[in-house]
Image: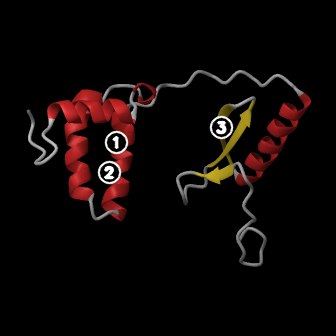
Amino acid sequence: MANGKGKKPKAIKGIFKRPDGSGIWWINYYIEGKRFLEQVGRRSDAVALYQRRKTDARMGAKMPEVRARRAVLFEEIAADALVYSQEHKASYPGDRSTVGKLLPVFGKVPLDNVTPQTIKAYLDSHFDERCGVGT
């Protein structure tokens, strides 16, 4: 594979591929308690950038400003979650039902504005827990 001997390269903390099998590598690091996540591309580029970011942080170098990104909407994550659920979970029919209840309310809401507490509050106030019937 990567080293010519059929072995996977050694995992490095803070560097990962997402989604699995995509060939797209990301780096994840923290500076002064703030999380940074950057999409890089190739694994070798991710290793080099991760090492550079960590070195800059240790030396106190100012981090480059991260370009503003488009907000991820609840409906986008919900779609990904349903794909995962269908492929890996026996509870897919229930998951599909729950997402169907949430999409009309939270679908176009940026994910940063949706918390587990807001979802629970909505479900508790609009659906009878015992049978899932709307109130």
Q: CA distance from mark 2 to mark 1?
A: 6 Å
Q: Are marks 2 and 1 in contact (CB under 8 Å)?
A: yes
Q: Earlier in the sequence, mark 2 or mark 3?
A: 3
Indicate which disc residue 117 carries. Answer: none
Q: Position of residue 94 (x, y in %)?
A: 22, 53
Left/right placement of residue 17 relative to residue 133 reads right
Point 77% across, 52% down: residue: 44
According to the picture, the residue beneath numbered tag 1 turns out to be 78
Residue type at mark 2 is Leu
Q: Position of residue 71 (x, y in %)?
A: 47, 26
User: How many C-alpha atoms fall within 10 Å of the one at disc 1: few (<14), some, or many (≥20)?
Assistant: some
According to the picture, the residue beneath numbered tag 2 turns out to be 82
Q: Position of residue 34 (x, y in %)?
A: 68, 29
User: How many C-alpha atoms fall within 10 Å of the one at disc 2: few (<14), some, or many (≥20)?
Assistant: some
From what the image shows, is residue 83 above or below residue 64? below
Left/right placement of residue 80 relative to residue 20 reads left
Q: CA distance from mark 2 to mark 3?
A: 25 Å
Q: Is 50 or 92 nearer to us in this picture? A: 92
According to the picture, the residue beneath numbered tag 3 turns out to be 38
Residue type at mark 1 is Ala
Q: Is 55 or 120 nearer to us in this picture? A: 120
